[in-house]
Every structure is written in C-alpha cells, then in structure tokens.
Image: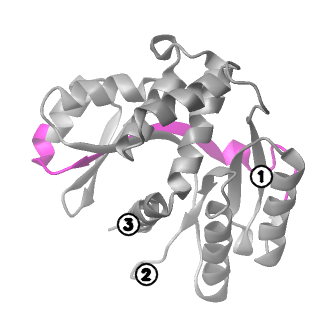
Amino acid sequence: MSGHSKWHSIKHKKALVDAKRGKLFTKVIKELSVAARLGGSDESANPRLRTAIQAAKDVNMPKDTMERAIKKGAGELGGAEPEDITYEGYGPGGVAVMVKVTTDNKNRSAADVRHAFNKHNGNLGTSGCVSYLFEREGHIEIEGGEEDTVMEVALEAGADDVENQGDGYYLVKCDPDNVQDIREAIEAKGVNVVGSRAELVPSTRVRLEGKDLEQCEKLIDLLEDNDDVSEVATNLEYPEGSA
C-alpha cells in the first residue's frame, strides 16, 4: 500500500474518533452554513451544499441540526456568519500545508493556526506560496465489491478514476462539483458508499522520516483538532513500512 493510502486510512480512522467526540459535527455544521451562505439554501442549485448535506447524513446528524445550520448560513437566524479563510505554509522538511478554516472570529483562528505552525517547526506563509501545488478533487469511498464491477459502475456514473486502496476499499476520483450526483448514481447500482467529499490533492509529494516526520504529524494533528479548521491538506508522503 502506498504512503498516500496509509495516510488516507489514518485520516479515516481519525475521522471516526472525531465523530464520537462531536468534533466532526462542529466541522460539518460550519460547512453547511458556509455552503448555504455562498450558494443559497436550495441544494438542487448548490453542489457544495448537497455535498455538505451528504456529509452530515454520513455522520448521522439530526435533520433539525442540519436545517438550523443551513438557515443560519442563509441569514435566516441572524448572528455572526462563518466564513472560509485559507492559510498556507510549510511544515518540517519543507512539506507544503494548506489549512482551510471556517470561522466567525478571524483573529482567533489566525492566532491558533500560527501557534500550531510555530510550535511544530513550521512556517506560516503568504497567500499563494503553496496553493499552486494543489487541486481540488472529488473523492468517493467505497467498501466491498469486486474491483471490475466497482470500476465499471463508477466510470459509467461519470468518475475520472478508481483506485484500489486495499482491504476491500476503493477510492473514486471525480469532478469536485459532481460528487453528489456521481455518488447517487453509484449507490443506485447497489454499491456500498461509505463517504464522499471534495478535498485538496497535491501534485507532488515530499517524503519525511525521523524527527521531521514526527513533527509534521504533530502539526497536522494539532490543526485538525481545532474546531475552526475544516480541512488540512499536505503533500506529505509516508515512507514505506510506516503507518
């Protein structure tokens, strides 16, 4: 299994732990609000909101909680409106780091992100310093099924590619604006989808070992544990044999 696949598995397990602690709920609620604010509360005309609603369903969020988050984002409930802010920088060993924050307090979020970088031997950079290394890509996770069948169904649904992640898991890659449509088409064929989202993917990767790897992992963990942080993307590649 590649280093990318191992990191993907680690993130998946971490997401399950976060869900139990309620952290993932907080992040999904903020994404629902921002999606509704930017594109309106009509999910049929707002791909980002449709993806956020599906993410909420994947973690069994109550319907009234989803609706309240959407209404808040659309300005129907008043109060401070969250917004998206992206920070860029470098972690240990020159690893590129992108941090997407969804917040109603920019000063607090900026201070928290800067603290995380400084604490773990990183450097917060200027806008554009690493973003050119990343592109947003739609990802759909599938569990179970024969590889040929999964690939055929996914490609017919409009996916760009399918990767076998091992242990019965497949990663479907697609246009980030069409994640929900493709997911629904795949599910209609009886294939078991366990998650879907749009996320940043690096064009190149940096492999670290030893202290640099340890520090980079700590930086990523600290950022992801922050309630305001909705996404952390890096071009870190684990060495073979690490987990």
Query: Which residue occupies the foreground of this view, 192 or 127?
Result: 192
Task: Point out the tag, 1 or 3, that comes first from the N-terminus.
Answer: 3
Q: CA distance from mark 2 to mark 1?
A: 26 Å
Q: CA distance from mark 3 to mark 2?
A: 10 Å
- On residue 88, which mark appears? 1
Q: Amino acid at mark 1?
A: Glu
Decide: is 105 above or below 188: below
Q: Amino acid at mark 3?
A: Ser
In this view, the mark in front (3 or 2) = 2
| Residue marked by disc 3 | 2
Decide: is 197 above or below 98: above
In this view, the mark in front (1 or 3) = 1
Q: Is residue 40 left or right of residue 118?
A: left
Q: Whole-percent x and y of residue 67?
A: 51, 27
| Residue marked by disc 2 | 242
Q: Whole-percent x and y of residue 226?
A: 67, 60
Mark 3: secondary structure: loop
